Image (cartoon, helix red, strand yellow):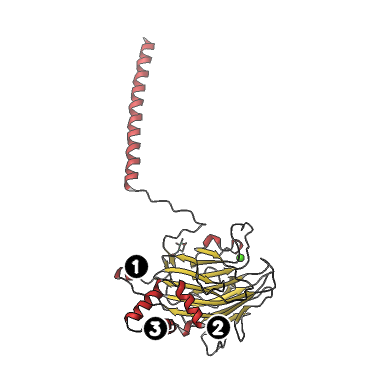
Amino acid sequence: MGARGRRRGKMAAAGRWRAGLAVLAVALGLGGAAAEQTEEHLKREHSLSKPYQGVGSASSGLWDLLGNAMVMTQFIRLTPDVQSKQGAVWNRVPCYLRDWEMQVHFRIHGQGKKNLNGDGFAIWYTKDRMQPGPVFGSKDNFLGLGVFVDTYPNEEKQQERVFPYISAMVNNGSLTYDHDRDGRPTELGGCTAMVRNLNHDTFLVIRYVKRRLTVLIDIDGKHEWRDCIDVPGVRLPRGYYFGTSSVTGDLSDNHDIISLKLYQLTVERTPEEEKRDREVFLPVVDNLRLPGMEAPLEPMSGLALFLIVFFSLVAFVFAIVIGIILYNKWQEQSRKHFY
Ligand SMILES: *[C@@H]1O[C@H](CO)[C@@H](O)[C@H](O)[C@H]1NC(C)=O
Ligand SMILES: [Ca+2]
């Protein structure tokens, strides 16, 4: 696929910021250079592409390999189509950008027929790196963001959800990824994405701008981005690491990464937004409502409390008055009875 095609596809759906960038470029008299703007924002220290120079080398290079991951000429194979493998590739350089976009060019293919393949792969932006574990080959209770391309439905009752399924999770270290339920209790959003055994290129984009997390996919070979996930109010600390990992179990697939391209996005913030988007030290999602969480009880308002106390008092006084009346009646009756 030509670079022009990709750029056009990106412009078609990549949203307002790029259009804004183009307007800015024109305003600055740069004219047709707008398309090249993207290239200038590519951050090589957080990107991975052919010929994968220095990847996995102990002394040089920007990326480390873990487990069964292997560098090939045309791609990095996180796992082969073999049972019980896991592999990962992790950026060595922490990312301090505030607004960014990660473009993932990937390929998932194997011998398994429909839903007899697994398990998928994850793209990470996390505090820890190079830690093998149960979440698509990486550690659980992570700090940061995970985007999962899950190719196998572990949960049986999945009639209403078609796999492969892409979902996102933000974790402050306290949440556990529920593998048996495909991460449903902790997912922020997701979409179905038929990404296996395709003859055209497949892409996924994770965009993080002004605390808004969006995931878009380009998997139909039409050079068009399609919305998958959109969550506002996501607060991610800076200085975390990008990585991608994969695992196979009883079922398997080749999970190949052709490239990871990280773009710095330049956006303007109003002073109000500056204040809102100040630094955080733990990942947080504002107004988080996970399906597995009960809605928190509303704190009682002052008025409600007053009314409850007031009517309790009224009822109490009323009861006493009734009691006195009844007592008097009873005494009267017993007096009558006596004499
Ligand atoms: C981490 O997140 C969970 C779930 O969103 C929340 O209940 C908990 O208070 C958070 N912990 C910290 C230290 O922020
Ligand atoms: Ca699964």
The answer to whether residue 143 is seen in the rendering is no
Name the foreground residue: 177 vs 192.
Answer: 192
Instruction: Report crowding for label 3: few under 14, some 14 to 19, many 20 or more residues within 10 A (C-alpha).
Output: few
Task: Tell me the quarter of the picture where residue 273 sits.
Answer: bottom left
- Which residue position is annotated with label 1? 276
Secondary element under disc 1, as helix, strand or loop, is helix
* Vertical order, 161 against 2 (above or below): above
* Residue at image point 35% right, 33% down: 315
Ligand 2 shows up in the quarter that is bottom right
How far across and down, in percent of the image, does residue 210 sit?
39, 70
* Residue at image point 61% right, 87% down: 73
Label 3 close to label 1 by CB (< 8 Å): no
- Which residue position is annotated with label 3? 32
Cβ(mark 3) to ligand 2 < 8 Å?
no
Which of label 2 and label 1 is nearer to you? 1
The amino acid type, in three-letter code, at marker 2 is Asp
- Which residue position is annotated with label 2? 64
Secondary element under disc 3, as helix, strand or loop, is helix
Instruction: Report crowding for label 2: few under 14, some 14 to 19, many 20 or more residues within 10 A (C-alpha).
Output: many
Task: Tell me the quarter of the picture where residue 121 sits.
Answer: bottom right
Instruction: Report crowding for label 1: few under 14, some 14 to 19, many 20 or more residues within 10 A (C-alpha).
Output: few
253 vs 7, left or right, is right
